Structures are given as structure tokens and as C-alpha cells.
Amino acid sequence: MDEQEDKKLEAFVDKLMEEAPLESPSVDFTQNVMHKFEVDTPKEVFQYKPIVSGKVLSAVFIAFIALLIIMGSQLGVDNSQGWFKNVNMEKWFHADRGWVQSFTFSKVTVYAFLSFGLLFFAQVPWLKKQMQKTVF
């Protein structure tokens, strides 16, 4: 029964195809299609424009450096002059590394760093393999 239906369907389709006229494209079909492609080229939707231009940033940077130079020349950097007369600069640059000798990590912190490090270095080859599968 299936074969009979297939034969009837095929005969019906053949009859429809015989009745349908053959259509040919117009003479300038290729030119029309190419013109559509040329006209419908995608335009850039978003173009990045910085809020502050590079020239303005350069001018602000140069002005800031000039201000620092002027302040340094007028006020000086000696401890006894201007803004720096009440600031004890030796404390800022004195290296006190005694706390390093008594500092210890807890076991939990050491295990956490070790496990995260191990997981990180296990993840890198796995990610590399995944990236090679998707790229190539």
C-alpha cells in the first residue's frame, strides 16, 4: 500500500511540474543582486568615542606636572619649609620589617593556598585543551 501511495504522489508531482511554466531571470538579474549587496552593507552600529579626547588628557597631564614642578620650586621639599614642616618623613621611609619574623600563616590558609594553586594549575591544561577543540 505504501508503494502505491508513493507512486500516486510521484505521478501527481510530475503532473504539477509539467504544468508549471519555466521561469527565467531577467537580463540584469546579477547586477540587481550585486547592487542589493552593495547597498545593504552592514554599517557600524557603535563607534567608540572617548569621553575626554587624548589631546585634553595630554594637556591635563602636562598641567599637572607643571603644577608639581612649580609647587616643588616654591615650597621646597625640605622638612623645615612650607607644607612639609610638620611632617615627619623618616617614619614614612623607615623600613620596619620586624613583624615579618613573627608572622605565621594558619594551617587552613596554607591548605587553601595549596589547593587553589593545585586547582589553578590543573585548570590551565584543561582550558587549553578545550580552546584547541573549539578553535581547530
Image (spheres, rainbow, N blue to C red):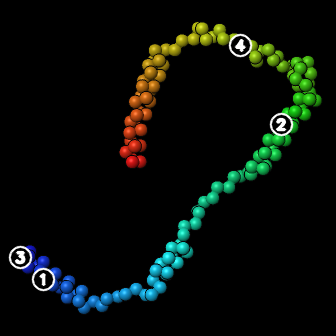
**Compared with residue 82, is residue 31 higher up or lower down, i.e. above or below?**
below
Pointers 2 and 3 in contact (C-beta within 8 Å): no
Q: Which mark is residue 70?
A: none
Q: Which residue is mark 2?
A: 65
Q: Identify the amino acid type marked 1.
A: Lys
At label 1, counting other C-alpha atoms closer than 10 Å, the crowd grade (few under 14, some 14-19, many 20 or more) is few
- For the residues labelled 1 and 2, the Cα–Cα distance comes to 91 Å
Q: Identify the amino acid type marked 4.
A: Ala
Q: Which residue is mark 1?
A: 8
**Mark toward the viewer: 4 or 1:** 1
Q: Secondary structure at mark 4?
A: loop
Q: Give the mark, 4 or 2, whose residue is nearer the N terminus.
A: 2
Q: Secondary structure at mark 3?
A: loop
Pointers 1 and 2 in contact (C-beta within 8 Å): no
**Mark toward the viewer: 2 or 3:** 2
Q: Identify the amino acid type marked 2.
A: Ile
Q: Give the mark, 4 or 1, whose residue is nearer the N terminus.
A: 1
Q: Which residue is mark 3?
A: 1
Residue 104 seen from this side: yes
At label 3, counting other C-alpha atoms closer than 10 Å, the crowd grade (few under 14, some 14-19, many 20 or more) is few
Residue 112: x percent and y percent? 45, 22
Residue 16: x percent and y percent? 23, 87
Q: Which mark is residue 95?
A: 4
Q: Give the mark, 1 or 2, whose residue is nearer the N terminus.
A: 1
Pointers 4 and 1 in contact (C-beta within 8 Å): no
Q: Secondary structure at mark 2?
A: helix
Q: Give the mark, 3 or 4, whose residue is nearer the N terminus.
A: 3
Residue 85 seen from this side: no
Closer to us: 21 or 67 = 21
Q: Identify the amino acid type marked 3.
A: Met
